[in-house]
Image (cartoon, helix red, strand yellow):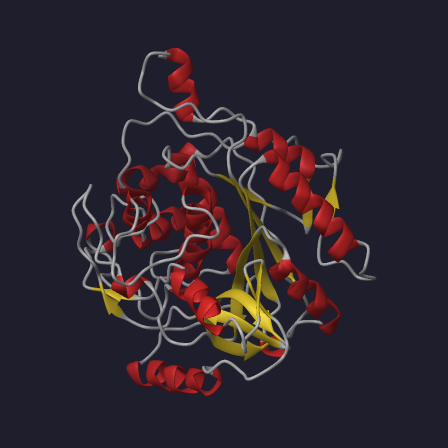
Amino acid sequence: MEGPYEHMFSKNYENQINVFSEFLEDLPDTDEPVWVLGECYSVKTEKTELLSDVHSRLWFTYRKKFSPIGGTGPSSDTGWGCMLRCGQMILAQALVCSQLGRAWRWRAEGGQPEEYHRILHCFLDRKDSCYSVHQMAQMGVGEGKSVGEWYGPNTVAQVLKKLALFDDWNSLAVYVSMDNTVVIEDIKKQCRQASRGSRLATMCPHSQSQSRSDWRPLLLVIPLRLGINHINPVYIQALKECFKIPQSCGVLGGKPNLAYYFIGFVGEELIYLDPHTTQSAVESEAGSGVDDQSYHCLRSPRRMKITNLDPSVALGFFCKSEGDFDSWCNLVQQEIQMKRNLRMFELVENHPPHWPPFVPPTKPEVQTTGAEFIESSDKLFESEEEFEILNV
């Protein structure tokens, strides 16, 4: 099973972590290309563009002074919520690509589009925000995690898959692979499901609801174990190739005691966003803009040696259209499958006959959207086949 990266931190230990992270903070003066979520940069000639890209990613960290989770639970996630925050970051990247596009850039002076603020509202630290730490922690109860317990990459992916069912605005399909296998047939079946928006438009053709296309945007998450106690060096080049793919949405992982959101690499070092900073919760009324300065990390990108990576990771990819997904399949086959003796994961066309039938997850018929629906999540999802990757 997923080994715990992290225990409850003392304040002193947190400070030691932050000081240690500073050692690799400045970008190296190198001729090697820097890859960030499918984009390639030169440090020497495109440093401004590179930093703008990194600073534009939504950065979710520990928060304090939010309303207690479940009404009586913790009001801070310091010491236990870092993988939840990394899960928020990978999902936020998918939503930004879906609503704003990969080329969108954040400006510190403001003037962001309405969709940007709407995305941020999805992650505010309150029980009625779709992807809040409140929702994630309570949905995790259905995955066998107590509120305040640390998550691994696969568990947080399963939680995001369930929460996405309640997000009618984005209509995102979250597919989490099992047994190191991505099944093309199953993904197309899930992404071709009619979204709630398109069903409403069909039933009420004169309504103002905008009909969705036949393909729901896809966040594909692939939980993997790339070694026993340390990452096996045979997987390193394939892992780096994942950051070059245009559909790259980052990687969830870390090292013992720490979870990071990896967004790229340079040479033999991974570039990541670090959630281990505690900030005060941000208050914002529905329909209004969000004070967003604390949701962007404006220091130089942090780095760590790939060889220090814990082997338990989850790869993320975003495909906005079916053509986008077909392109991803071709790239994976050419750049990751055919060039490697030992594959990180399998990509197969058809559903394996020895597996249980694939049933795309559907939103339960409930009339509420707050955290209260999560308390009975076991009953709501009884019909859904759940698979856990075996990390041994």
In which quadrant is the N terminus drawn? bottom right
In which quadrant is the C terminus drawn? bottom right
Q: Residue at x 32, y 73 (%)?
A: 277
Residue 195 % position (x, y): 45, 27
Residue 226 % position (x, y): 67, 65
On screen, residue 199 versus residue 45, left or right, reads left
On screen, residue 220 versus residue 168, left or right, reads right
Name above or below for residue 3 compared with residue 208.
below
Total marks shown come to: 0
| Residue 175 in view (yes/no) | yes
| Residue 144 in view (yes/no) | no
Q: Which residue is drawn at 33% across and 27% down?
A: 366
In this orientation, which residue lies closer to the viewer: 248 or 192? Answer: 248
Residue found at the far front of this picture: 45
Q: Which residue is drawn at 29% across and 81% down?
A: 11
In this orientation, which residue lies closer to the viewer: 266 or 66? Answer: 266
Residue 331 % position (x, y): 71, 50
Picture quadrant of residue 321: top right
Residue 216 % position (x, y): 51, 33
